[in-house]
Image (tube, rainbow, N blue to C red):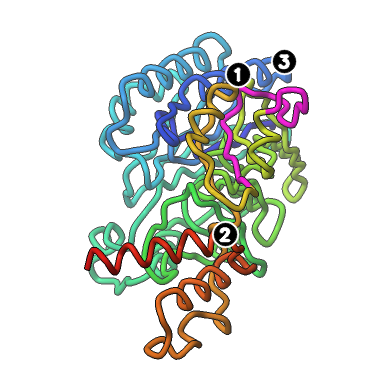
Amino acid sequence: MKFIHIGDLHLGKWICGHSMIAMQKEVLFELLTMMDQQDIRLLLIAGDVYDRLVPPIEAVELFDDFLTAAIRQYHIRVLMISGNHDSDERLNFASQLLKPEGLYIASKLQENWETCLLEDEYGDIEFHLLPYIKPSQVKALYPEVKVKTYQEALAQVISQHPLEPKRRHVLITHQFVAGGQQVQTSESETILSVGGSEVVDVHLFDNYDYVALGHLHAPQAVSRQEVRYCGSLLRYSFDEVKQNKTVCKVEMKEKGDTVIEQIPLHPTLTMQKYSGYFAEFIDETKNIIENKQDYIAFELLDDSLIANAMERLRMLYPNAMQLTYKQLLKEYDGKKTVANLQVEKQDDFTLFKAFYQTIRDHELDDEKATIIANTLEKAKEIK
C-alpha cells in the first residue's frame, strides 16, 4: 500500500505582513496532481492544518476546496488529526458525516481512538489517529493516573491501546518526539511547554511500523527511518531557507518492509536569505538574486546604516521581508565588554570609543570620532 504523509500546512499564515495563501494553494494542488499521476489514493495529514485557532476565511475556503478535490475528483481517502495550532471543535465539525465520504478526522482525545482498517495484498493495515494531546487532557480522561509531563501522558494513552500483532500499524500523531540524536527545530514552530517537558521518547512508538509525525518543520527521521517528521510544506522562517521541503511517500509491503521516498514540491516563490553589500543588491547588472519575486531577507555587510534601505530594495524586490546589518548585530564577547573598563573613572568619549570597539571589532575612525566628540559637547551644554 502506498500513501503520502504531510503535516504542518499552517494555512492562513502571514509572515512579515505577507500572506502565504497563494503559495499554499499552489503546493496543495500540485500534491494532488502528483498523487494522481502516481496512483496514490491515501493521504495522511499530521496536524497543524491551520496556523491559528480561528483561521481566516480564505484559509478555510482553501482547505475546503482541497479536500473536495482530493475526495471527489481524485478519489483520495484522507486521514487527518489536529495539531497544537488547530481548534479541536472547528476541525471536528461534521466528522461523522464526512467519514463515509472518505475523510477521517481525529481532533479530540478519547478513550477509543479513531482508526481506519485497510487491506492490501499483504494483509491488514490499521491506521491509528492520535491528535495532539496535553497532560491536562489525559488527566481528565484518566483521573486515577498521575500525569505531569507529555511523556507520562502519551505513555498512558498508548498503554490503553493494544495492537493486533499480526497487522501492520501506522500511527498519525502530533508531538515533539526525540530519540538518540538531536532533532532539528525551526523558529516558526511554537514551543509546547516550558523547560522541555513537551518532549516524548521515540521508543514509545516501537510497536508501530510507521509513525507519521507532525509539529517540527524540518523533514527528518527520529531514531529510525519509519518514525518521521515530513516537515512543513513551505519554508515559514528564514532559518529554514536551506531546508528542501518535501512530502513523504511511503510504500508498505509485508511487515518490516517499508520504503520511504521524499518528494519535493515546486512552489513558484519561496523564502530566501542573502548576505552582501547594499550596492551589490541594487546593481541590476550583477544578478545576485535569481528570483526577484521571492520572499527575501537581506543581511547587509555595510558598516553603517543606509538611508531608506528597505524602501529602495523593495523597488527591485517587491517581497523583501527583512533587513538586518550583520556588523551592527554582533553579540557581545563575555571576555570583552565595556564593563572591563573602570567605568566610573572614564569620560564619556572614552566609554563610547570602547563601546564602539566592542560592537564593531574595529576602532572609531577620525571622522566619526570628531562627530561623536562634538555631539557629546553639545549634550553637556544642554544639561
Residue 163 part of the magenta-drawn span: no
| Label ID, residue 68 | none
Q: Give residue 169's position: percent from left, percent from top.
A: 59, 47
Q: Is residue 373 left or right of residue 369?
A: left
Q: Residue at x 48, y 47 (%)?
A: 188
Q: Amino acid at mark 1?
A: Leu
Residue at the farthest top position: 73
Q: Give residue 6's position: percent from left, percent from top.
A: 57, 36
Q: Residue at x 57, y 17 (%)?
A: 29
Mark closest to the chain's N terminus, 1 or 2: 1
Residue occupied by mark 1: 32
* Quadrant assignment, res 140: bottom left
- The residue nearer to you, when weighing 367 against 103, is 367
Which portion, as a residue range, is magenta?
A: 283-300
Q: Is residue 355 above or below residue 215?
A: below
Residue occupied by mark 3: 37
* Quadrant assignment, res 250: top right
Q: Is residue 42 left or right of residue 194?
A: right
- The residue nearer to you, when weighing 239 against 63, is 239
- The residue nearer to you, when weighing 261 against 231, is 231
Residue 288 part of the magenta-drawn span: yes
Magenta stretch: helix, strand or loop mostly? loop
Separation of marks 1 and 3 at Cα, in angstroms = 9 Å
How many marks the image carries: the answer is 3
Q: Secondary structure at mark 3?
A: helix
Q: Amino acid at mark 2?
A: Phe
Residue occupied by mark 2: 205
Separation of marks 3 and 2 at Cα, in angstroms = 32 Å
Q: Decide: few, some or many residues near mark 2? Use Cα within 10 Å; few <14, some 14-19, many ≥20.
A: some
Q: Residue at x 38, y 47 (%)?
A: 84
Q: Decide: few, some or many residues near mark 3? Use Cα within 10 Å; few <14, some 14-19, many ≥20.
A: few
